[in-house]
Image: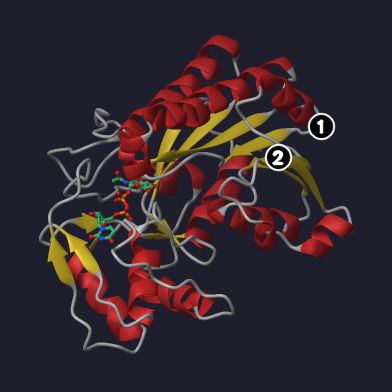
């Protein structure tokens, strides 16, 4: 059991980070947020939690080591959620993605060692596996990423493992599989779910890259939050890596159909275009390791999680779909 009352969430204004922050506040932690607001949103953070001191907001960049060190000194544990996600962006700008995802993580780990942080939980990604012959993907399989994004997440994960071994820093890496949920952004680099929902809401057909038979293990953000809470509390071997997913698969074609139904426009059929570079065919997780070691039990399949996401996209200021497809 790791005892910590003050925890820092990097990327705490972002999609996954802010959902985690809400839960940590409810659990009674004093929560710090370190975010540069490049993709995070102040509206993702509960104003009253800031005003009443439950959340401490630190504006800044994880690529700035001095700043990272100055912030980390006030915390006992760190959730490292800050990153530039998106396979597509990493293909366009691998240097920037490396700077944020790899150097940013290294800065945090170095500060954590020097300031004797009790645990660092790192948000890794299913993209580290790349295209594997065997499914579902198990943590013992080799990692051969096929995008700069995947390479950056693997490099950062390796730093977590090495820091555990060399400096004794308790790190845990959670490999998230295609996370979705409220607050996920719609835009040029967003995941397939916000894109499809926004297009359907605007009476545009979802655009599928390839034949639509590619599958993903879509994971609801509240399951990811739960895994993070468990990863902080449970004692696991430093440097361990865990798949965090729903443990099932949905093809992109099925997803388009399901969303069209849930949005109330079942007559809108998807369009098919060329496959996307850097894409993998299948992503499906074996989650038994997280089940055994952390007690992780996912509670949502897409049909259960998606209605809440659609509701969230129906709120004020819902995005308007761009033409052509933003991805
Ligand atoms: C990848 C990573 C994931 C990471 C995410 C960040 C893998 C296995 N997963 O997810 O860990 O968090 O990037 O962005 O590498 N698609 C369409 N039409 C669209 C948009 C997407 O058909 O308009 C398809 C894509 O071709 C892909 C699937 O939907 O096959 C999912 O795409 P996306 O949501 O971008 O996530 P991944 O690339 O799977």
Label 1 crowd (10 A; few <14 / some 14-19 / many >=20)? some
Question: Is 140 drawn above or below residue 218 in the view shown?
Answer: above
Q: Which sits in the foreground, 22 or 152?
A: 152
Which residue is disc 2 drawn over?
A: 8
Quick check: marks 1 and 2 in contact, CB under 8 Å? yes
Judged from this view, the residue extending furthest toward the front is 323
- Which residue appears at 67% of the width and 53% of the height? 21
**Which quadrant: the N terminus?**
top right
Q: Please identify the quarter of the rendering in which residue 289 is found.
A: top left
Q: Which sits in the foreground, 181 or 219?
A: 181
- Which residue appears at 74% of the width and 37% of the height? 3
Residue 70 coordinates in the image, percent (x, y): 78, 25
Question: Is 100 drawn above or below residue 34 in the view shown?
Answer: above
Question: Is 327 drawn above or below residue 61 in the view shown?
Answer: below
Residue 5 coordinates in the image, percent (x, y): 79, 42
- Which residue appears at 36% of the width and 53% of the height? 178
Mark 1 to mark 2 CA distance (whole Å): 9 Å
Question: Is 311 drawn above or below residue 109 in the view shown?
Answer: below
Residue 76 coordinates in the image, percent (x, y): 75, 33
Q: Is residue 269 left or right of residue 119?
A: left
* Disc number for residue 74: 1
Q: Secondary structure at mark 2?
A: strand
Q: Is residue 209 left or right of residue 129?
A: left
* Disc number for residue 123: none
| Circle count | 2
Q: Which sits in the foreground, 297 or 84?
A: 84
The tag earlier along the polypeptide, 1 or 2, is 2
Q: Is residue 43 left or right of residue 176?
A: right
- Which residue appears at 61% of the width and 44% of the height? 11
Judged from this view, the residue extending furthest toward the top is 166
- Tell whether circle 2 marks a residue whose Cβ is less than 8 angstroms from ligand 1: no
């Amino acid at each position: 059991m790791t005892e910590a009352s003050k925890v820092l969430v990097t990327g705490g204004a972002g999609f996954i980070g802010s959902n985690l922050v809400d839960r940590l506040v409810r659990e009674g932690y004093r929560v710090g947020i370190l975010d540069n607001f490049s993709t995070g949103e102040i509206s993702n953070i509960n104003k009253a939690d800031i005003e009443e001191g439950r959340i401490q907001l630190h504006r800044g960049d994880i690529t700035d080591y001095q700043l990272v060190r100055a912030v980390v000194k006030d915390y006992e544990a760190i959730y490292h959620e800050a990153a530039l996600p998106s396979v597509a962006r990493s293909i366009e700008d691998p240097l920037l993605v490396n700077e944020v995802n790899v150097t940013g993580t290294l800065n945090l780990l170095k500060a954590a060692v020097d300031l004797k942080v009790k645990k660092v939980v790192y948000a890794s990604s299913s993209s580290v596996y790349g295209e594997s012959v065997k499914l579902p993907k198990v943590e013992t399989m080799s990692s051969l990423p096929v995008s700069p994004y995947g390479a950056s997440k693997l490099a950062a994960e390796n730093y977590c493992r090495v820091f555990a071994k060399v400096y004794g820093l308790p790190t845990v890496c959670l490999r998230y599989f295609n996370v979705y949920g409220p607050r996920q952004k719609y835009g040029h680099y967003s995941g397939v779910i916000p894109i499809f929902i926004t297009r359907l809401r605007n009476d545009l057909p979802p655009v599928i890259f390839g034949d639509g038979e590619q599958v993903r293990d879509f994971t609801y953000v509240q399951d990811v939050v739960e895994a993070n809470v468990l990863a902080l509390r449970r004692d696991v071997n430093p440097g361990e890596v865990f798949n965090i997913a729903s443990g099932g698969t949905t093809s992109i074609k099925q997803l388009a159909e399901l969303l069209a139904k849930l949005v109330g426009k079942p007559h809108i059929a998807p369009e098919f275009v060329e496959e996307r570079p850097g894409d993998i065919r299948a992503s499906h997780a074996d989650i038994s390791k997280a089940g055994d070691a952390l007690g992780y039990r996912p509670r949502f399949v897409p049909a259960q999680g998606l209605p809440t996401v659609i509701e969230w996209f129906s709120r004020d200021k819902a995005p308007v779909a761009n033409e052509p497809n933003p991805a």
